[in-house]
């Protein structure tokens, strides 16, 4: 792939790792985001032996092993197979994009994990669906907190109540997806299959087939998709606004306690992975839940050990304070790890994190993207910087995207800093429309 060309539609896996500057990137789709301490210890060792000891938590709740040497890939695959972490083949792996609520099933209200596993089995086994585009994704929110409502999905199921079970949505976030009625846990794989089949049927007849459900809705309308799946559009259930959560610190979940820890830029080394596994056994039930917010959660902790848990994770370089400035910025590896990058995105993001926190007290305020692909973050951000030839384009309240690149922009880091400081100080006109 030539430099500057985007990895459009590439979604790396274990069978189909993606070449990067630091070696192969192997992405693991961990079923239901649930992983045991012993598995994490084996992964940490595999990262030392076959990779460059660096792991990443992706914004789809997956785990990535970085810097894998080509010659070591077969041995790594063998280890992953022994852990039951990879599918039979590339196609089955690629289609199994199912994001589940991080705390699903912990409070015993419903059996979402079982439904999610049945959906994964259906996707892997139904070869007709292996033609789905690489990033086409399914989401199941079981109603626990933190909610997945702010995350967009192609086909989604959001828990409403015991009477109605799951709201079926396509092409968006919980508030915004096209609503197609309700279904039970048992019906969830079948409904997914019908909608995914409708997507393939309708998109295959187009000159430029869309790669996501939102694109198909824009092309042929939601009524056509619903009809092809034998369903109907309905009035959506009423819901309040759903903010992006920051699951850091002690989390109360229907009488249970969990502890969430953040990882700067979602990047951790093998020693940190070992530490997280040890914490899961020491403070919880030996399990870790991965989240799409670059944080992991230790379930089943006791409230009175919260300080000890925080101290333990702090000593192992995890973030335990939701107000930590490092949580105000998102960035991919940029020029350090990727051929498409031309700047040191993470260093630049760290140099701007204090300013970012002043722009927004909560959540991610600044996304520094190595290019228009925006791998580090799909959601919009108060300020997004898109690197281009060593400079940045600045896009307010949007995502990183190709049409965000302006011929007029080519801002140096110093200019970006001055501009943002002036916005915060209220000096001059905020001609860029940055919210603060
Ligand atoms: S966003 Fe970052 S990681 Fe993704 S392709 Fe661009 S430079 Fe590479």
Image (cartoon, grey):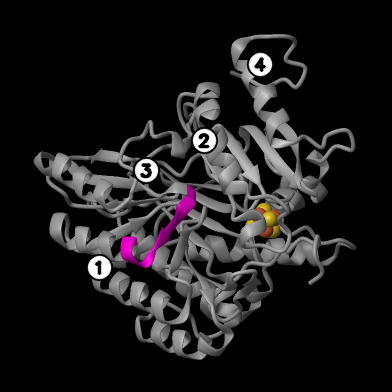
Please give the residue where the numbered disc 3 appears in the rendered image. 143
Q: Are marks 4 and 1 in contact (CB under 8 Å)?
A: no
- Tell which circle, 3 or 1, labels the residue nearer the N-terminal end: 1
Q: Are marks 4 and 3 in contact (CB under 8 Å)?
A: no
In the image, taking residue 194 as reference, residue 292 lies left or right, namely left
Q: Say if residue 230 shows up in the picture.
A: no
Span of residues in magenta: 265-272
Q: CA distance from mark 4 to mark 3?
A: 41 Å
Q: Quadrant of ligand 1?
A: bottom right
Residue 311 in the image: x percent, y percent?
20, 44
Residue 344 in the image: x percent, y percent?
63, 50
Please give the residue where the numbered disc 1 appears in the rendered image. 37
Please give the residue where the numbered disc 2 appears in the rendered image. 364
**Which of the two marks, 4 or 1, is nearer to us in this view?**
4
Please give the residue where the numbered disc 4 appears in the rendered image. 422
In the image, taking residue 40 as reference, residue 138 lies left or right, namely right
């Amino acid at each position: 792939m030539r430099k500057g060309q985007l990895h459009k539609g590439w979604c790396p896996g274990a069978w189909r790792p993606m070449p990067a500057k630091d070696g192969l990137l192997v992405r693991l789709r961990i079923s239901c985001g649930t992983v045991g301490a012993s598995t994490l210890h084996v992964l940490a060792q595999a990262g030392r032996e076959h990779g460059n000891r660096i792991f990443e938590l992706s914004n789809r709740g997956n785990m990535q092993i970085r810097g894998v040497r080509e010659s070591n890939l077969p041995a790594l695959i063998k280890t992953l197979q022994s852990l039951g972490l990879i599918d039979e083949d590339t196609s089955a792996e690629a289609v199994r994009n199912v994001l589940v609520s991080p705390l699903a099933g912990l409070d015993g209200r419903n059996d979402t994990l079982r439904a999610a596993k049945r959906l994964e089995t259906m996707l892997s086994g139904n070869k007709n669906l292996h033609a789905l585009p690489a990033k086409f994704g399914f989401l199941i929110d079981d109603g626990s907190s933190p909610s997945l409502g702010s995350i967009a999905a192609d086909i989604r199921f959001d828990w409403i109540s015991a009477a109605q079970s799951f709201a079926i949505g396509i092409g968006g976030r919980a508030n915004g997806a096209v609503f197609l009625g309700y279904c039970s846990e048992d019906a969830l794989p079948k409904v997914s299959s019908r909608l995914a089949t409708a997507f393939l049927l309708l998109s295959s007849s187009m000159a430029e087939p869309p790669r996501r459900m939102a694109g198909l809705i824009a092309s042929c309308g939601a009524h056509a998709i619903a009809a092809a799946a034998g369903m109907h559009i309905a009035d959506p259930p009423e819901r309040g606004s759903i903010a992006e959560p920051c699951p850091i610190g002690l989390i109360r979940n229907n009488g249970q306690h969990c502890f969430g820890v953040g990882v700067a830029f979602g990047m951790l080394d093998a020693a940190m992975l070992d530490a997280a596994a040890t914490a899961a056994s020491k403070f919880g039930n030996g399990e870790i839940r991965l989240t799409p917010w670059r944080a992991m959660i230790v379930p089943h902790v006791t409230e009175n050990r919260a300080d000890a848990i925080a101290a333990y994770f702090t000593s192992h370089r995890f973030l335990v304070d939701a107000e930590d400035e490092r949580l105000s910025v998102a960035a991919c590896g940029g020029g350090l790890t990727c051929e498409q990058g031309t700047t040191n995105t993470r260093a630049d993001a760290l140099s701007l994190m204090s300013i970012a926190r002043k722009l927004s007290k909560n959540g991610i305020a600044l996304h520094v993207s190595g290019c228009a692909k925006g791998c580090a973050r799909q959601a919009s951000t108060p300020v997004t910087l898109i690197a281009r030839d060593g400079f940045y384009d600045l896009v307010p309240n949007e995502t990183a995207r190709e049409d965000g690149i302006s011929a007029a922009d080519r801002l140096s880091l110093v200019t970006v800093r001055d501009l943002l400081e002036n916005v915060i100080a209220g000096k001059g006109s905020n001609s860029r429309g940055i919210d603060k």
